[in-house]
Amino acid sequence: MVILSKKQEQVAEKSLWLPQLERDGCGVGFVVSIKGIKTHKILCEARTMLERMAHRGACACDNDSGDGAGVLTAIPDLLYRKSVRKQDEIELPPPGQYATGILFLHEDSYKQAKEAFGDLARACHVRVISWRKLDTNRSSLGEEAMKTEPLIRQVSNCSYNLHNIDHLPIHFIC
């Protein structure tokens, strides 16, 4: 049940606004090195920050399923390079000349999603280098999260023209 003020009730009656779909969005924090120095300390502080944001209620009723909050970092090049080499037996381009992303997909539509991603990449003049299946640990999932656990894949891609990388960030946003 959603409790509304008189004004909110009036707005809801005369618009497409659905108050029952409203969600609070509080709690954003940043832990950075303004000099761009990568340290384990930054990750530890970011984790502490996440732990201290538990008051947001960012968990399901089982208290073990989270809201997806996490930490954004630069690409851990050595880790990715080693993993892609091991699984796909290929070498990634030099750091800064490739991008990577984590995709959360539905198992039933994985093939269609992979094909659509490839089509979009080609349209943006980006070459898909690899699709990696990631190791996961289901033992930490809550009951609610387990019901909707997605298929998780990591995609790495690069520009077709590595000699002119000025346009690279635009392609990866595409």
Image (cartoon, rainbow, N blue to C red):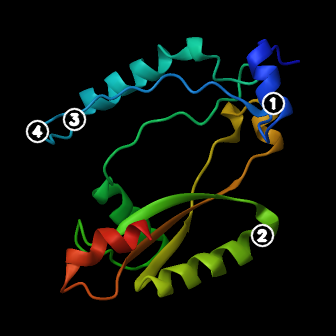
Q: CA distance from mark 1 to mark 3?
A: 49 Å
Q: Secondary structure at mark 3?
A: loop
From this view, report whether residue 138 is shown above or below residue 40: below
Residue 104: quarter of image = bottom right
- Is 35 on the left-hand or right-hand side of 120? left
Foreground mark, 1 or 3, reads 1
Taking the spot 21% from the left edge, 35% from the top edge, the residue there is 39
Residue 35: which disc? Answer: 4
Residue 168: quarter of image = bottom left
Taking the spot 49% from the left edge, 22% from the top edge, the residue there is 27
Q: Secondary structure at mark 4?
A: loop
Amino acid bearing label 4: Lys
From this view, report whether residue 31 is shown above or below residue 93: above
Q: CA distance from mark 3 to mark 2?
A: 38 Å
Residue 1: which disc? Answer: none
Chain-order first, disc 4 or disc 2:
4
Q: Secondary structure at mark 2?
A: helix
Residue 39: which disc? Answer: 3
Amino acid bearing label 2: Ser
Amino acid bearing label 3: Thr
Say which residue label 2 marks.
Answer: 109
Where does the image place residue 130, in percent across and percent down from the top left? 48, 75
Is residue 61 among what the camera can see?
no
Q: Quadrant of the N terminus?
A: top right
The image shows a total of numbered marks equal to: 4
From this view, report whether residue 132 is shown above or below residue 14: below
Tag 4 near tag 3, CB within 8 Å:
no
Say which residue label 1 marks.
Answer: 12
Amino acid bearing label 1: Ala
